[in-house]
Amino acid sequence: MLALPDDELIAALAGRRRPGIERELCRLDVGALRARASVAGLGLICRCDPAYPAQLRSLDAPPAVLHVSGSLERALALLERDSVAIVGARRASGYGLDVARSLARGLATAGLTVISGMALGTDSAAHAGTLAAHGATVAVLPGGADRPYPASRRPLYRRIVATGTILSELPAGAAVRRWAPPARNRLIAALAAVTVVVEAGARSGALVTASYARELGHPVGAVPGRVTSDLAGGCNGLIRTGATLIRRPQDVLDELFGEGVVTYREAVRPPLREELERLLCAVGKGHDTIAALGQSGFSPEQALAGISELELCGYVRRGPGGRFSVVP
């Protein structure tokens, strides 16, 4: 629908309100729109501007205007760099959140721009992982760029504005309609050189982003998950139909640049002595409770002390029911 000319769009959707909408369009005051954006602290760049992001021109319906919260110059500079979209489920599992943060952290250390939608779950984890590595991140919102969406992500919004950028095709103050998130997803897919889906159910919006990326000829990657998990169905399906299997940041870099051409810097964590290495390996093999570690050859005292140390060093994370998982 967004690809239709204004008159055809109004004819298709306006119904009995068509005469009033046509009059409103004729009376549109572009100067007032610019003033409203300025008051909201937004920068604007029109499709007719030579500096307009070239990636968006490949869309059937590129935004007529991009609205930018934060420095417009910084936004354009970030979008000129190699970039990766990291998207996934809103109700992500602990595994999905850990992987999203880890991927974003590693890609940020390699100098890539990480793009996502600032939604709950995977998107926010990707932005947070990038910021933790002092990297550059771009959030594309389904409403006005002057308003955090969802509102609970206001602190994250402020951090992104300070060092990265917030984008939207909608004007200042625009509310989020049901059609807006899928429309926003086409921008994420177009701006990113590769799109990675971390977790996704069968009807996840992240699969819409992946579909747009494939239509544009951009590579798609997916993180595998348990076949018994609803959150893994979308990713496993993408892999089955040709998406690159993503396990770590290096897999993304190899897909984008070729094997070993660009590498990333691992997060610095304290080295482990042999006993803790064995304990970490046991957790990774599924011995994820103190009792299970006891059955794999560790005394309860060893397991308790070792798990506490691994947790403090950032190697494992405690989950529901006293279960532990390895942090990527």
Image (cartoon, helix red, strand yellow):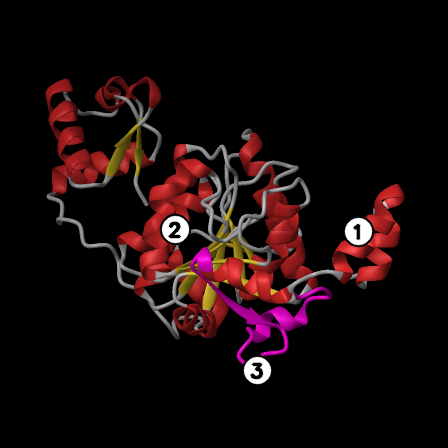
Mark 2 or 3: in front is 3
* Mark 3, other Cα within 10 Å: few <14 / some 14–19 / many ≥20: few
**What percent of the width, then of the height, locates residue 311?**
19, 34
Magenta part of the chain: 39-62
Residue depicted at 52% across the width and 39% down the height: 89
Residue 106's tag is: none
Mark 2 or 1: in front is 1
**What percent of the width, then of the height, locates residue 72?**
43, 69
Cα separation between marks 3 and 1: 31 Å
Which residue is disc 2 drawn over? 127
Q: Is residue 39 left or right of residue 132?
A: right
State if disc 3 and disc 2 touch (CB < 8 Å). no
- Element type at marker 2? helix
In depth, the one of 172 and 212 nearer the eye is 172
Mark 3 or 1: in front is 1
**What percent of the width, then of the height, locates residue 176?**
59, 42
Which residue is disc 1 drawn over? 21
Decide which of tag 2 and tag 1 comes sooner along the chain: 1
Residue 50's tag is: 3
Q: Is residue 290 left or right of residue 223?
A: left
